[in-house]
Image (tube, coloured by chain):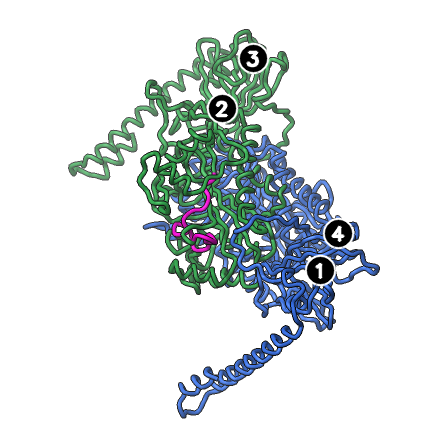
Chain colours: A green, B blue
């Protein structure tokens, strides 16, 4: 027991601390295990010898590190392609060993590839040795393996797999990349729905996020991020078809553009800079630069110490801005329709994924009406008052108010998506165009899914004099935003736009309940890793 | 002359500096002008009175601030739609007053809308008053205007406009948003090609970028950024069709992930963080998380004090990562084909824009062969040696070497795009997979356009032990990248990928010569605004 001796030697004859004692105990235990496994290995080898020559010796094993020494000559199928239609054919798949269970002369394995699973069966026989069976049953779960087998139609559906009509009679198994035997979380647990009545374990959010690489392997997560990728694709495709141009705006900016609070500071060579809280100023400058209609998808940063279910310090903004002719409703109605087209796109193309997610995170289907329901802010306030909320006409909506209003709207209009138009001027950013007839209000709007805000937008002030006046009113240092104000000095069409929180759309469409579940690697005031 | 008196008073009887004298002179000149224009105004008003009632008084003017008080009832055409086919029809367009030129009873205007221009003609007559003509000829260039007119076929082509077969006989003109009369740069100058033999003025790069909103209005810039938007669209579409999933990776990270140098530091609440130099580690973690094939488009940050034609501190990365079966060439060849598909997409869909750009920035057409040419690094070195360059087999290529090799390759293989494979291990990042048979080399590649690097990529080490060893060799603090290393502990398929610099692709495809011309709002060590 060299570890223990060394540790003891270090301490000499002195009295040991609790920590030191623990260390000793651990080392002793480790050594004990080592000896046990060495003994087992000897036994195994003996058994193997007894079993005689290995008839399967070229049919299983480890590839070793794949370092691109040979080209691929195998035709791999996807697990999702395996069905009774291939009955009798020999196929190769590469996937993860999801589970294995051996008993006597047989071993059942489940091979998982993203959202799909297939059952494999090994039985000791003429061409399948005891050694091979042992090798396979000792492969640690989550290892990446290559499996060759003959597809066999099954009589009774395989309940535990997505491929229900056929299994593989396995002939070869090779380990591509082995997993450590001890996993920080079990994929089955991470994939399980929270259920108070069940005693089966689930995985809490922090454990999930600490071990995100494993967590992402659940069918639910595979589905969530497929849907999210679809959301972005529909956003861009719908806008491109409508004549929008994609742009890319800088994230490092020279001044805290939107009021100064909640902005991250960056060391920039010998000076300092900030991280953009939105592409707002730049997409407007693109409009002043004659781009007419623009969109941009990119990271936005909020140094807000908000530890809620819906705030992150970094998220993906789906932003758009559009010149209009006479009325900002031309833009607001466009955005409403763009969102509806996205919802339709998801529902039409990702039904399987939606159902996969719903098994773990049950939710009501997302409902909407077309065209989008538009309510005036004052109408919203009136509905809340009628429901007993005590508030002024031009007060801001609290988060609980928004939630409640969402419920009231759903009851009355049967939609989980709606637009609230004409917000009080006082609660909007300085660049918001005031209403022409009632200066208490503004040409601005929010859009909601299931009672939570996913978009904030408005007609922007395109006149440099009024813009300066409003910035001063908001106590913004004019010299810090001079380049932005100057952008409007050389003629600028009236324009409006909005910014959508991508992760919020995913969270609310799927009813996930926490924004961290719809971010691949979420960032909040307390989380910067992985 | 209050300005002058005040200035003089301040100085009392002391002798004045040159600066002070200049100030006085300027103030005097200003006052003189003021008086002149007041006199002119009086004259004008007198004339107007003499002219009697204004027959056009409802046909021109300023809308005033468009604040969304009325809905649009006008059917606007795009300038690009105006041609002799509409002869005799009355149409409305909204565009910028590009130029105006009045003489006696006529005024010619050119209305510009993005890449397109149309000529308008006003002649004093029964329905068009002298006052209206004066109003129109006084509108400052770059103002956004609404113009109504009757389309008239013309006999001789209009050389100065893109719409050559017809002009507008203008009946109404309204100012939507007026420009200040003095522009910091002239659009015609900004749109002009550099030509040593011409005396016409052009605009230098810094003036352009300082006044980017005006500069972006040139047809060349409109075309450059349309092509860039197309590049991103093709990148995503081609990959989506090949089964890739779009992901979004965090930009704020807890540790300088790729070696520590050249990284921007961010104040993160009470601690600090860094800006990601690439999505490298996260796209690999997505592969370990079973995403199989991923791409991401987003900002990447390099705190490098490089003031060259091809470096920026922030740019857009078109990144991809892909699991492969046995050989990284599966990925390298895929990326090569993706780039070729992008080039074909641009050439097939943006020919008009390419020609527009080439008028200002002349370049040879971009040539490529299909499939992509792949050369070994050692072959490249041999070609350079043959051309007289003195270098070792496993030395890194300098920028001039790369340029020269690009020329040699173009001469020999008739392609502006090629792949250089199997770089020396020593010149690549720690996570690069070494070559299996010769440890001096690695499974890595760069891709080049017109002799400049646009992509760097490799097979990555997917084994945590080897990864740790290589990181230590590169003197990277293991504890800072532990989450990344851990990602490979639970099985990970072999994988490879690469990162493309979006702005470099635009610059090199179009032969622009400076990366700042292909970035909407470029960032370099010396530029943070606008």
CA separation in Å, label 3 and label 2: 20 Å
CA separation in Å, label 3 and label 1: 74 Å
Task: Using the image, name the chain to which the residue with label 4 belongs.
Answer: B
Q: Which mark is residue B170?
A: 1
Q: Which mark is residue A355?
A: 2
Q: Are marks 1 and 2 in contact (CB under 8 Å)?
A: no
In the displayed structure, B383 sits above or below B127; it is: above
**Labels 1 and 4: the sequence-earlier one:** 4
Q: Are marks 1 and 4 on the same chain?
A: yes
Residue B387 seen from this side: no
**Which mark is in front, 3 or 1?**
1
Give, as a single range, the part of the protein colored magenta.
A419-438
**Which mark is in front, 3 or 4?**
4
**Labels 3 and 2: the sequence-earlier one:** 3
Badge 3 marks a residue whose secondary structure is: loop
Task: Using the image, name the chain to which the residue with label 2 belongs.
Answer: A
Badge 4 marks a residue whose secondary structure is: loop
Task: Using the image, name the chain to which the residue with label 1 belongs.
Answer: B
Q: Which mark is residue B89?
A: 4
- Kindly identify the residue that appears in the image at 38 percent across and 60 percent down: A475
Q: Are marks 3 and 4 on the same chain?
A: no
From the viewer's side, name the closer residue of B465 and A254. A254
- Kindly identify the residue that appears in the image at 57 percent across and 51 percent down: A326
Q: Are marks 3 and 1 in contact (CB under 8 Å)?
A: no
Answer whether residue A431 is magenta in the image: yes
CA separation in Å, label 2 and label 4: 55 Å
Residue B334 seen from this side: yes
Residue A495 location in percent, x, y? Answer: 54, 52
């Amino acid at each position: 027991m060299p570890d223990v001796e060394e540790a003891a030697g270090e301490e000499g004859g002195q009295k040991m601390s609790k920590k030191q004692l623990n260390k000793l105990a651990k080392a002793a235990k480790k050594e004990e295990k080592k000896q046990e496994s060495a003994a087992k290995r000897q036994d195994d080898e003996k058994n193997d010898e007894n079993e005689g020559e290995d008839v399967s010796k070229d049919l299983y094993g480890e590839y070793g590190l794949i370092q691109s020494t040979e080209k691929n000559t195998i035709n791999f199928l996807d697990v999702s392609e395996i069905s009774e239609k291939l009955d009798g054919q020999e196929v190769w798949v590469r996937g993860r060993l999801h589970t294995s269970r051996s008993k006597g002369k047989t071993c059942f394995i489940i091979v998982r590839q993203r959202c799909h699973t297939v059952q494999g069966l090994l039985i000791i026989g003429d061409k399948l040795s005891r050694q091979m069976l042992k090798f396979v049953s000792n492969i640690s779960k989550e290892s990446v393996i290559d499996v060759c087998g003959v597809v066999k139609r099954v009589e009774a559906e395989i309940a535990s797999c997505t491929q229900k009509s056929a299994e593989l009679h396995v002939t070869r198994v090779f380990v591509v990349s082995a997993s450590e035997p001890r996993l920080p979380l079990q994929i089955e647990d991470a994939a399980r729905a929270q259920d108070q009545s069940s005693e089966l374990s689930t995985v809490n959010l922090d454990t999930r996020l600490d071990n995100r690489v494993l967590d992402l392997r659940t069918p639910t997560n595979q589905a969530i991020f497929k849907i999210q990728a679809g959301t972005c694709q529909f956003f861009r495709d719908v806008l491109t078809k409508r004549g929008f141009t994609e742009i890319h705006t800088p994230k490092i900016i020279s001044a805290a553009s939107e009021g100064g609070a909640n902005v991250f500071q960056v060391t920039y060579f010998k000076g300092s800079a900030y991280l953009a809280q939105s592409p707002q100023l730049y997409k407007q400058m693109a409009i002043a630069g004659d781009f007419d209609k623009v969109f941009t998808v990119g990271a936005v940063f909020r140094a807000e110490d908000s530890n809620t279910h819906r705030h992150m310090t970094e998220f993906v903004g789906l932003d758009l801005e559009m010149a209009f002719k006479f009325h900002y409703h031309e833009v607001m109605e466009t955005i409403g329709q763009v969102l509806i087209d996205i919802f339709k796109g998801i529902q039409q193309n990702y039904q399987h994924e939606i159902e996969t997610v719903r098994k773990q995170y049950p939710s009501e289907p997302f409902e909407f009406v077309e065209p989008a329901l538009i309510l005036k802010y004052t109408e919203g306030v009136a509905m809340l008052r009628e429901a007993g909320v005590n508030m002024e006409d031009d007060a801001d909506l609290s988060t609980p108010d928004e939630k409640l209003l969402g419920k009231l709207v759903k009851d009355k209009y049967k939609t989980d998506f709606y637009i609230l138009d004409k917000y009080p001027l006082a609660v909007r950013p300085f660049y918001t165009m005031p209403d022409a007839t009632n200066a208490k209000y503004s040409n601005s709007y929010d859009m909601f899914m299931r009672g939570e805000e996913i978009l904030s937008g408005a007609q922007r002030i395109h006149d440099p004099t009024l813009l300066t006046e409003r910035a001063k009113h908001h106590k913004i240092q004019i010299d810090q935003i001079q380049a932005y104000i100057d952008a409007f000095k050389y003629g600028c069409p009236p324009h409006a736009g909005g910014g959508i929180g991508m992760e919020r759309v995913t969270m609310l469409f799927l009813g996930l309940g926490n924004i961290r579940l719809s971010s691949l690697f979420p960032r909040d005031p307390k989380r910067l890793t992985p």
